[in-house]
Image (cartoon, rainbow, N blue to C red):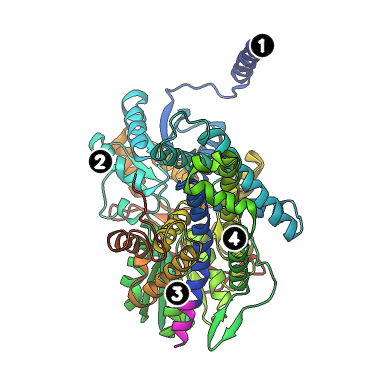
Amino acid sequence: MQELLQYFFSGITNGAIYAIIALGFSMLYNATGLINFAQGEFVMLGALGLITFWRGLQLPLPIAFICSVAGVSIVGLLLERLAIRSVRKPHPIVLIIITVGASILLRGVGMLEWGKDAYSAPSFSRHSSFELAGATLLPQTLWILGSLLLIVIGLQFFYKRTLTGKAMQACAISKRAASLLGIPSERMVLLAFALSAAMGGVGGILIAPITMSSYDMGTMLGLKGFCAAMLGGLGSSWGSIVGGLVLGILEAFGVGFVSSSLKDAIAFILLLLILYVRPAGIFGVKAVQRF
Amino acid sequence: MRYGRSVLMTTCVALALIVSGISAPVCWSEEPYKIGGIFSITGRTSFLGDPEKRSLEMVVDDINKKGGIDGHKLEAVIYDSEGDPTKAVLAANKLISKDGVLAVIGPSLTPTTLAIVPIFEKAKIPLISCAAGIKITEPVKPYVFKTAQSDVLAVKTVYNYMKSKNIKKVGILSVENAFGESGKEQLLKQAPDFGIEVVQSETFGAKDTDMTPQLTKIRSVKPDAIVCWGTNPGPAVVAKNVKQMNLDIPLYQSHGVASPKFIELAGEAANGNLLPTGKILVAQQLPDSDPQKQVLLDYISQFEKLNNMPVSGFGGYAYDAMHILAKALEGSGGDREKIREGIEKVSGYTGVTGTFNFTPEDHNGLGSDAFVMVEIENGKWKLLGE
């Protein structure tokens, strides 16, 4: 029982991170129909950015948080402005490959800027771990879950209650019709890139205290986030969250009850299964467009 | 501007050549002895190759200042393998066919060494590797030697210490790469010799962010100690997780994390961790009776003065290799077969890594005194008694 609870805590911690990354994938997919494979690198930039601003420059945590999120969003903006928009024939497959290229570039820049060493950050709050029925719960887990909740509420509000959010959804449904109605669709795409990059950055900042951050941490996290987004249904916020948490918990239980060498395989087995059985994901309504 | 700089550079080089020509103290009567070096000087594993190259050059300069070997000046030709086996093979072929070296020191890694071993066996040229893998010298190959401690000794040191602490049951947590696999193999193999039972063996990915599930599983079988075998950053995460879970079980680490980086990464969680390491980390704390103490202190002060960077244990592998090779070169007259036999006869040489006693059956020559157990206390290494 005690073990079960411990696996569960570990699972939701990682799952919540996957969910935040998946939300970034979903948001961009919603607005542009694109899958951004540089999402994992935004996570890396967020984590290393936090370490630079918080540990390096000794800024207070909230300011360091804002600075790194802003920094990552600017990278997202630049990616859209310089690499995506300037493509002459913006076929989705071309754009997706560009994002793969961008991820390699960002990893390289990260390596040059921060070197190949790993860095660690202390927990946000100095509180020691909580004991719960023999299992330990980290304060950082609560930070992560709380942030996830805030992000979801914020997104729901943005999509349902604000004109910009509605305009972004309109662009996703039909870019042409939206621009005929006077919606500046290009600006919406730009905004979507910035927001999804910021989401990746937040994921990185939250995970920095519980693990070690290095220039190549993003690849695996990005892939796991992608699995979570596919699992829940690309484009659905709730789907991303459920997908992320399910993936995290299954991984933890897989390690606990089967074998620790299976950990990474679980995500990809799930991805294959879901693509066979229900390509739209758990919460997806429309079939995923295949390129 | 660019033109101006190149002229300046050329002038500098020319001046340097002239100056060095003038100040050469010894007049060499004999042909120089050419020694090859292959190290991972750049790339991911430059933390190994860079100090090795610097240490090798340091020893070569020392020997030349003292008049060389039997009147022969030593000349080191060093190539960078970048940690890539293909580049190591290219460098090895170049050293043998173009430079015509008498013997080669390096490479820094087990994969790069294993890639070039057949070349040296075929060319009958002695190779002294600075890599740790046990496969390099086991089974013994006539022309291949190594100076780095292998994990067999590290495991032996850990288990010896555990035995003295009356630890009977251990849980293993190893990283999924060559280092972790090899360590795990040794941990499982040697456990019965020390009356230790491995009750649980788990692995983690080199980039994993959370090892709580593995540790939970290990905790459930109630071991007396946990051994984590990996290289940074994984073991630091393990140390953090153990602290967070309030596990009341001693955590042993491998020599793979014996660097200040581990203490930096794990922070407070590093305190209380126990690990085997080469003596260089705790040179100051060694008893004066330890024959290695003086060697280590000399090496550390010489290296730090010359290179203006903190010393690491890795440069010592090349330092020892060059000293051993120098002993073998004496009286060999530049004959490769005699050099090979000479290395096998080196015994009682006290180096940075340990005391070497080579024999035709043992091409590593180190005993378990090459490792000591240390505990991390308040972010510092503390030498533990036997």
Q: Amino acid at mark 2?
A: Pro
Horizontal and vertical percent position of residue A60: 76, 59
Residue at image position (47%, 75%) is B161
Disc 4 versus disc 2: nearer the observer: 4
> Between residues B298 and B197, which one lies in front from this camera angle?
B197
Q: Which residue is mark 3?
A: B213
Real-space Cα distance between discs 3 and 2? 43 Å
Real-space Cα distance between discs 1 and 2? 48 Å
Q: Earlier in the sequence, mark 3 or mark 1?
A: 1
Q: Which residue is mark 2?
A: B118
Q: Which residue is mark 1?
A: B4
Horizontal and vertical percent position of residue A203: 57, 59
Q: Which residues are magenta?
A: A1-8
Horizontal and vertical percent position of residue B78: 45, 32
Real-space Cα distance between discs 4 and 2? 69 Å
Are the numbered discs 4 and 3 placed on the same chain, yes or no?
no
Q: Is residue B172 above or below residue A1?
A: above
**Image marks 3 and 1: residues in contact by CB distance under 8 Å:** no
